[in-house]
Every structure is written in C-alpha cells, then in structure tokens.
Amino acid sequence: MYITIDNMVKRYKTHQRQNAFSANSQEEFYNWRDETREVLINLLGMDKIKVCEIEVKEVSREKVDGFYRDKLILKTEEDVWMPFYVLIPEDYKDGEKRPWHYCMPRSWQWWKAVYCRQG
C-alpha cells in the first residue's frame, strides 16, 4: 500500500527546510522574518510586478439587508483588476461622522501596508 505521509516524512528528513524557524531571540526572529519574506517575494514573483497608478472603478450597487453593497475594482497592475466590496449603511448621510471599517486584500504594490483599517 502506498502511503503519502510516509514518503513526505522521508523527504523532509533528507531535505531540510531551508528557512525553518529556529530563532532564540527577538533579534534572530526579526532576521529570520526578513530573510524569509525575501525568499517568499522571490518565489511568488512579487519582485517582478510593475507598479502602476492606483485606479478604482465602481462596477455595481445593490441594496442588501439595510446596506448598500458597492462592488468596485482596483487596478493593482497594468491590465490586472482586483474586485472588492464596500458596505454602506442605508441610513448613512453624507458628511456624517461614524466609525468606519474597510478590509481588502493587499495590493502587490502595498505589500508592507496594513490590510484592514478602522476609523
């Protein structure tokens, strides 16, 4: 009988993980984090992505359960558009001061930015 996990364990014993976590101090952790981040950026090809001007377009708006759900698209690269949604309370009035939230997947050009914000 062929067991996948046995084969995988044997492979890991033969080939160590090149960026395995082994830090014993905060400084070692930060060094590991920075080195591993660079490896991931290279493996994912993020270093080859061309930065473009930010552009957002509204695609649609629909009323859902006391909210307006706006679908927008964000230009993250030339010819690459990422969809996201904005939920706006139905009773919101322009200029009104209210706590707000937005969450969206990070854009390639903002890889160091915070993903979700609140105000």
Image (cartoon, rainbow, N blue to C red):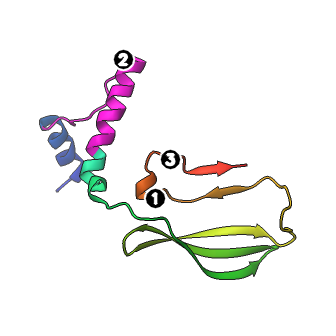
Q: Quadrant of the N terminus?
A: bottom left
Inspect the image, locate mark 1, and give the three-letter code of the amino acid beneath it.
Ser
Q: Nearer the viewer, mark 2 or mark 1?
A: 1
The residue tagged 1 is 107
* x then y, percent, for residue 115: 55, 51
Residue at (65% x, 58% y) in the render? 102
* x then y, percent, for residue 44: 28, 55
* x then y, percent, for residue 57: 56, 76
119 with respect to 74 (left or right): right
Residue at (75% x, 55% y) in the render? 100
Q: Earlier in the sequence, mark 3 or mark 1?
A: 1
Rate crowding at label 2 as few (under 14), some (14 to 19) or many (20 or more) other CA atoms within 10 Å: few
The residue tagged 3 is 113
How far, Cα to Cα, is label 2 from label 1?
33 Å
Inspect the image, locate mark 3, and give the three-letter code of the amino acid beneath it.
Ala
Using the image, determine if residue 58 lies above or below residue 17. Answer: below
Q: Earlier in the sequence, mark 2 or mark 1?
A: 2
Question: Does the magenta-highlighted stretch encompass residue 96?
Answer: no
Rate crowding at label 1 as few (under 14), some (14 to 19) or many (20 or more) other CA atoms within 10 Å: some
Residue furthest to the top:
25
Q: Give the magenta part as a residue range.
A: 15-39
Question: Does the magenta-highlighted stretch encompass residue 28?
Answer: yes
Contact, mark 2 vs mark 1 (Cβ under 8 Å): no
Residue at (45% x, 45% y) in the render? 112
Q: Earlier in the sequence, mark 2 or mark 3?
A: 2
The residue tagged 2 is 24
Contact, mark 3 vs mark 1 (Cβ under 8 Å): yes
Instruction: Name the residue nearer the viewer: 115 or 20.
Output: 115
Q: Nearer the viewer, mark 2 or mark 3?
A: 3
How far, Cα to Cα, is label 2 from label 3?
27 Å
